[in-house]
């Protein structure tokens, strides 16, 4: 009897469900509500003032205020750049916060405060519009309207008395109207010396705050208190006319124009000390003017020589001969690893007589600290010839910075020959199957050169220069360049692998004197290698 009841129960359930679905579908199809009407679409001019007021907050700022310009291009730029800006901003925030946290936590008997996660999310801020002011001063004033509805994941772990608590910031919203002033405008990149930031009104800040998984902002009264406190604190610091000032350049130095040229001739070095355990050192000289943002210049490497001769000449732009100095550093070139510093010295330009050549022999020091006892140790000497030539006119000759590429070839270069210069700039989209720690191997005329290794990087940058002295132009020669990755772990099954290679015909380099191109790597899916080639002759 129980079995029969069970069978009948299942049948009744199936029939009931089927009947219910059929009746429900019939009612849904044939009994539509009769009070639903199509929406009425009317022009804005026919709307009443109350309706317009409700819509006003949704209208873009550049529509309501003609003084504001559309900046869709900037929003598009932020959209593409945001994944990279997010990482850069978070890394900077960590670097700024670390010393502040380390200084403050001992006061509150806290063991540690650290970021477990720190990301600003996938949604970038958007600019609703931007107003630009034109003044008679050397300044640029911008007032953007910024809205940011973000999805950050900021988790801070606090450890104290053997306990750990995590605080998480989520669902961030920021509406702000800052005034950004770039001044003074100067003729040195980035063309402004300071950034001044003020808020034209109190910002709107809204966020969720989770402690041990519970949302603290849901506590009655706490949400409004925290929001108003943040508004007041930020307003007290940055509400106009108060400003946040960020110095980019020293205005007194940025406004200075070039006043002359320093001609430097690196003659030779004497009695250098061995850095290598076996054999002699491979010295070269780096030279740079202080207070200059230009990269250092370098002489060629003299292999296995403790008394090298260079006779290399360089021209350097001088902006302030009273404060600038020439810094000379001698390094021992290493095929792998960091180059060892053999010694250095500095020559103040104020010690030079204008238009008068001066030959100087300087002792190499460890550093410029007069109280360092290690500077008494003999490191060898370097001999240089310097001539400071002031400009007769106020203007710098056109393209002077590039004229240093007058690139004189070293003495002893065979007649009819020259110097092939290979500058390995960077690679892009290189990736190994097992590891990506790339360096570039150069093979030319049976000689092999290598750049330094960059660890865990698919877009490495090197900026390294290699030179080959040749007896004749390499019109029929090819240059083989290979991007290689080696494992940083001992005992791995795949210690080395090739990420791609390229063979370059040098006939075009001889005819054009200089080529700077990105080459697609063979045996690489998307890899490219940027190489600059120069052919320098005495003529």
Image (cartoon, grey):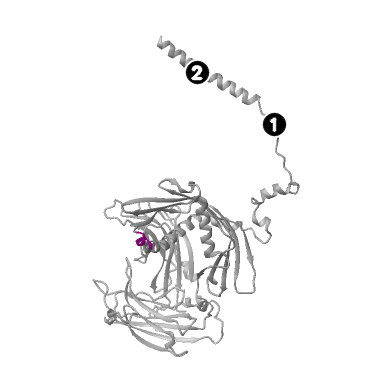
Residues in magenta, as a range? 104-108
Residue 504 to residue 469: above or below: above
Residue 523: x percent and y percent? 41, 53
Identify the secondary structure beneath mark 1.
loop
Q: Is residue 171 visible?
A: no
Residue on which the image places disc 2 = 14
Dominant secondary structure of the residues highlighted in magenta in the image? helix
Residue 396 to residue 439: above or below: below
Left or right for 44, reference 536 = right
Residue in the foreground of this view, choosing between 528 and 428:
428
**Mark 1 neighbour class, 10 Å CA radius: few under 14, some 14 to 19, many 20 or more:** few
Residue 125 to residue 408: above or below: above
The furthest residue to the front: 221
Residue on which the image places disc 1 = 35
**Mark 2 neighbour class, 10 Å CA radius: few under 14, some 14 to 19, many 20 or more:** few
Q: Nearer the viewer, mark 2 or mark 1?
A: 1
Residue 488: x percent and y percent? 31, 57
- The part of the image, by quadrant, that contains residue 129 is bottom right
The furthest residue to the top: 1
Ranked by sequence position, the earlier of labels 2 and 1 is 2
Residue drawn at (45%, 72%) of the image? 535
Q: How far apart are the alpha carbons under marks 2 and 1?
A: 36 Å
Is 423 in the magenta? no
Residue drawn at (54%, 76%) of the image? 399
Q: Is residue 474 visible?
A: yes
Residue in the foreground of this view, choosing between 462 and 379:
379
Residue 175: x percent and y percent? 57, 55
- The part of the image, by quadrant, that contains residue 479 is bottom left
């Amino acid at each position: 009897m129980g079995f029969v009841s069970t069978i009948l129960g299942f049948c009744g359930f199936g029939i009931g469900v089927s009947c219910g679905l059929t009746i429900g579908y019939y009612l849904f199809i044939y009994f539509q509500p009769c009070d639903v009407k199509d929406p009425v679409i009317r022009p804005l001019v026919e709307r009443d003032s109350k309706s317009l007021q409700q819509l006003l907050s949704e209208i873009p700022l550049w529509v309501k205020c003609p003084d504001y310009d559309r900046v869709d291009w900037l929003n598009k730029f932020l959209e593409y750049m945001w994944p990279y800006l997010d990482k850069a901003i978070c890394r900077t925030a960590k670097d700024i916060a670390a010393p502040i946290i380390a200084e403050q936590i001992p006061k509150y008997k806290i063991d540690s405060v650290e970021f477990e996660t720190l990301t600003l999310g996938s949604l970038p801020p958007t600019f609703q519009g931007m107003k630009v002011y034109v003044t008679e001063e050397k300044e640029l004033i911008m007032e953007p309207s910024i809205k940011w509805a973000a999805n950050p994941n900021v988790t801070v772990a606090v450890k104290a008395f053997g306990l750990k608590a995590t605080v998480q910031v989520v669902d961030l919203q920021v509406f702000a109207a800052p005034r950004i002033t770039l001044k003074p405008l100067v003729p040195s990149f980035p063309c402004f010396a300071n950034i001044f930031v003020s808020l034209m009104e109190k910002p709107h800040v809204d966020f969720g705050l989770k402690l041990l998984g519970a949302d603290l902002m849901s506590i009655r009264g706490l949400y409004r208190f925290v929001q108003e406190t943040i508004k007041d604190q930020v307003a007290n610091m940055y509400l106009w006319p108060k400003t946040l000032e960020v110095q980019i350049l020293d205005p007194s130095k940025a406004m200075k124009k070039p006043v002359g040229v320093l001609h430097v001739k690196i003659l030779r070095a004497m009695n250098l000390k061995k850095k290598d355990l076996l054999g002699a050192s491979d010295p070269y000289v780096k030279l740079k003017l202080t207070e200059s943002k230009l990269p250092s210049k370098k002489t060629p490497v003299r292999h296995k020589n403790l008394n090298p001769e260079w006779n290399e000449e360089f021209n350097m732009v001088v902006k302030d001969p009273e404060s600038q100095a020439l810094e000379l550093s001698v390094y021992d070139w290493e095929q792998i690893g960091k180059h060892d510093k053999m010694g250095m010295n500095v020559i103040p330009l104020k010690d030079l007589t204008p238009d008068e050549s001066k030959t100087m022999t300087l002792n190499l020091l460890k550093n410029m600290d007069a109280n360092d006892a290690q500077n008494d140790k003999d490191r060898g000497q370097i001999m240089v010839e310097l001539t400071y030539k002031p400009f007769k006119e106020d203007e710098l000759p056109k393209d002077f910075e590039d004229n240093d590429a007058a690139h004189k070839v070293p003495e002893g270069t065979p007649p009819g020959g020259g110097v092939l210069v290979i500058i390995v700039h960077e690679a892009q989209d290189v990736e190994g199957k097992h590891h990506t720690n790339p360096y570039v191997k150069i093979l030319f005329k049976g000689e092999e050169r290598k750049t330094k290794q960059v660890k865990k990087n698919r877009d490495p940058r090197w900026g390294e220069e290699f030179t080959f002295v040749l007896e004749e132009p390499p019109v029929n020669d090819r240059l083989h360049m290979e991007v290689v990755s080696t494992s940083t772990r001992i005992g791995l099954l795949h210690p080395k692998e090739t990420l791609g290679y390229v063979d370059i015909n040098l006939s075009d380099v001889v005819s054009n004197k200089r080529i700077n191109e990105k080459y697609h790597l063979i045996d690489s899916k998307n890899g490219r290698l940027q190489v600059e080639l120069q052919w320098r002759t005495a003529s």
